[in-house]
Amino acid sequence: MTTEQVATISKLRHKDLLGIADLTPDEILLILDTAEAMREIGDRPIKKVPALRGKTVVNLFFEASTRTRTSFEIAEKRLSADTLNIAAQSSSLVKGETLVDTALNLEAMAPDMIVLRHAYSGACHLLSRICRAGIINAGDGMHEHPTQALLDAFTIREHKKRIAGLKVAIVGDLLHSRVLRSNVQLLTKLGAEVWVSGPPTLMPPGIERQGVRGTTSVDEAVEGADVVMLLRVQLERMQGAFFPSLREYFSVFGMTRDRLRRAKPDVIIMHPGPMNRGVEIDSEVADGPYSVILEQVANGVAVRMAVLYLLAGGAEHEAAA
Amino acid sequence: MKRLLKGGRVVDPANGRDGAFDILIDGERIARVGKDLPVEGAHVVEVPAGFVLTPGLFDMHVHLREPGQEHKETVATGVASAVAGGFTAVACMPNTTPINDNAGVTEYILQKAAQANLARVYPIGAVSRGSNGDQLADIAELRAAGCVGISDDGRPVKTSLLMRRALEYAGMFNMPVLEHCEDPSLKGEGVAHEGYHASALGLRGIPAVAESIMAQRDIALAEMTGASVHICHMSAATSLRAVREGKRYGARVTCEVAPHHFTLTDESLATPVSYDTNMKMNPPLRAASDRDEMLKGIADGSVDVIATDHAPHHYDEKKMEFDLAPFGIVGLETCVAICFDRLVHPGVIRLARLVELLSANPARILNVPAGTLSEGAVADISVLAPDLPVTVDPSRFRSKARNTPFGGWQLKGGVAATLVGGRTVYVNESAGGAERFE
């Protein structure tokens, strides 16, 4: 553990986790610190604690997701919550029910928390207004994916022992990325120097107002970086004329071993997945010694356990149980 | 029956009047306007101090939703909303179901308006059949049935060629083409003004230039054809620049701005972050620099009209994900209060200029006999209460819809009563003395 940045609070006074935007630096650190403790549970032969026993958590996923949904489900089970999964294709959404009605029907069965993944920005805000259950944002449109940013920060902190002062370069489809928006919020709140890079067509308007440096030169972004994070480039973006071809994208923005030489010698390579090998990242880099991509996935469980635990009331709740 | 409105301040820019005058109403018309008119034979209404009599306000851009979308609004609820907002007349856009692209729909709307018998209704016909942008609608027939202008509102006129033809053809009747300026390819799937706030919220952007590029096209075609184009619900500074320039070189171009576009900015999306679908309209709330430019245009005369783009929606439709909710907000019952509070009281414009923007100018653009308190004119009169404290309470709207971003706003200035054809059609009980107009 670092001596530099640790939480000075012990409780999360929120009903929901809608985005990193709502968290103070102290609250972010509390989640990261709690995740440290949670990770140990995953190393035990019996990977289960009773923290959320008797709590019902609904994983409501309106978008396909393997990694995030599985990660949440494992986290919930390790905390002994009763979990159930609702995927869009099996829900009444296909029968034309609105999100609000779906949520109100779930709410009538009194779940304690709803983990929501949705294709539209702000869907979690909509649910949080109408539900007593705590809402955890598992990705809403192009807006936020807070647990991803938390697990990224957890992974960075593990390797670098700090976040403040690090140079973090984020490269890829910035415009459509909720991972970018959550990471920018989190990393700037904890004092990192954040650079973002990608084609000008995929640069979010006014991104500098979020306290980051934008450049179309990947080399400039990567120069001296402690962390390089690649974002997925969706294959259908060519249709929107954002760039001419995947081949050209790779040649201008793809992360290769050559480009990476500009970074610090102990740089770490991150990717929230799913990766397009040979588009935003060369396989040599993805599978290379600096890659922490699978560690990110492993840490996701601990971070989500921490979020679930803290939103459910943390130690306070356990005492009452 | 004769009624004498005695001693009120009359603001009638069409006749250069601003001062204490009496107005004698005989039946449906204004018989005389003057100082100290004789009272005999007339029912005398002592106009309470602080009230202002203006020519009937005319909202030239509303959506009444009938036929076809009666769950949102009907002609009857729409005109009830209009008179409660101080409007004696409205012009309704053709994007009903079916589209008002033929005399049958126009006549249906006018019949519903006659039954409701509140505000006057002037339908706007479609430019093209089904507003599809392929073939002109039967414009002469629409005009004969009562349409006063044409528009494919909700969409821009699809091609430059069709816009040229529409201007040329409608120009024969001296009818303006009212244009919803938007380049569909630049708008894409946008739902909010392209800029920092939309970006931070993960909402797809609609750049300001999506509007102004189409305004530039239309103004160029208006100049070429010599016909009149009216730019609807203008929101972007670059569009206003194009309008100013067009006016300077003699193109027949006019434009309107909606109250939300000179009041709110895209920052409303983020303060607080709520994805409030009552902040979703098209064109979207723009940057502060755009909003400020709208205010400048209103003050310097380059903006011709304030119109609300009253767009009622059912609450089920607005209680959706931001991306899925329909664009639009209601405006009829908040317009006057916002105009007083944001334009007249802060000194952006004088009251006489507001009356031009809300009455005389829209009447002139659509060639409608309104906008004046001349002797012999129909007695459509708005009784305004400039100092009335108003708290916007959507639950009390006469409109069927409640979709406003102004709920709870406290404003100074409101409506006391509304007279259409000499008949009192609305009295605001919370404006002391307004009951005298009963």
Image (cartoon, coloured by chain):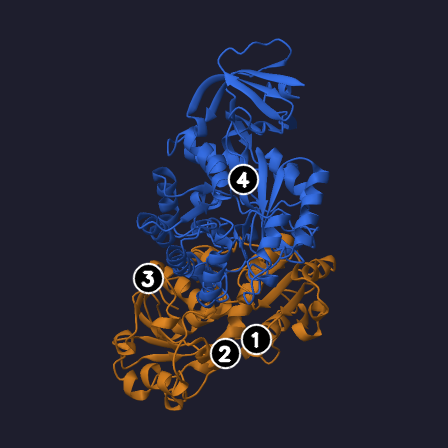
Q: Which residue is mark 1?
A: A71
Q: Earlier in the sequence, mark 1 or mark 3?
A: 1
Tell me the distance, in whole angstroms, between the alpha carbons under discs 1 and 3: 32 Å
**Quadrant in the picture for residue B417:** top right
Chain with colour blue in the figure: B
Q: Earlier in the sequence, mark 3 or mark 2?
A: 3
Q: Which residue is mark 2?
A: A297
Q: Chain for mark 1? A: A
Residue on which disc 4 sits: B368
Residue B305: numbered disc: none
The location of residue B359, given as percent across then percent down, is 50, 35
Q: In the rendering, which numbered label is found on residue A208? A: 3
Q: CA distance from mark 2 to mark 4?
A: 68 Å
Callout 1 and callout 2 share a chain: yes
Task: Determine the residue located farthest toward the bottom in the rendered image.
Answer: A284
- Mark 1 crowd level (few <14, some 14–19, many ≥20, 10 Å Cα): many
Give the chain letter at badge 4: B
**Chain displayed in orange:** A
